[in-house]
Image (tube, rainbow, N blue to C red):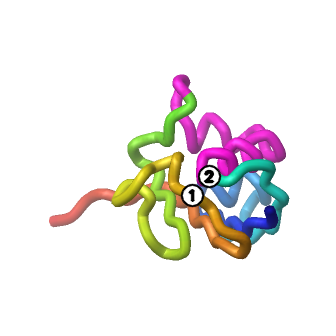
Amino acid sequence: MRTEFVLRGTLADAVDAGADTVSLVHDVDGETVGAAVEALTDAYPALESLALNSKGKLRAHVVLRRNGKDVRDGEWLATPLSPGDELELEPGTKGGC
């Protein structure tokens, strides 16, 4: 299944040095967001330590959206994929006044 990934911030920089945003289309062998993330980190090993913790789970500070909706609002990495889905990964930002 072909899936589009949009990477931002340091995640984009790990794929294309100096880029703020990177858009990639990648074939995914599986039907979940987790399979897609695994395919992406296999293709770009520098992303793995930035996006996943040592247990293979999404890092707490990484935002992962499927078609604009945060997967944390649903089934996390078990969220089903459909052809043409777009996955966005970006480092979370916290802070304030």
Q: Write down the residue under mark 1.
A: 80
Judging from the image, what secondary structure is the residue with disc 1 in?
loop
Q: Quadrant of residue 74?
A: bottom left
Of label 2 and label 1, which has the lower sequence position?
A: 2
What secondary structure predominates along the stretch shown in magenta?
helix
Q: Which residues are magenta?
A: 32-55
Q: Residue 20: which quarter of the image?
A: bottom right
Q: Give the residue type that dot 1 points to.
A: Pro
Task: Name the quadrant of the C terminus.
Answer: bottom left
Q: Is residue 15 above or below residue 51?
A: below
Asked whether 42 or 77 is in front, the reply is: 77
Residue drawn at point x = 54 percent, y = 67 percent: 66
Of residue 46 and residue 19, the one placed in the foreground of this image is: 46
Taking the view exactly as shown, the residue that stands out farthest to the top is 54
Q: Residues within 10 Å of mark 2 (few under 14, many from 20)?
A: some
Is residue 20 in view? no
Magenta span contains residue 43: yes
Which image quarter is the N terminus in? bottom right
Residue at label 2?
Answer: 32
Q: Residue at x 26, y 59 (%)?
A: 95
Q: Horizontal and vertical percent for residue 11?
A: 63, 54
Residue placed at 66% from the left, 38% from the top? 48
**Who is closer to the viewer here, 96 or 4?**
4
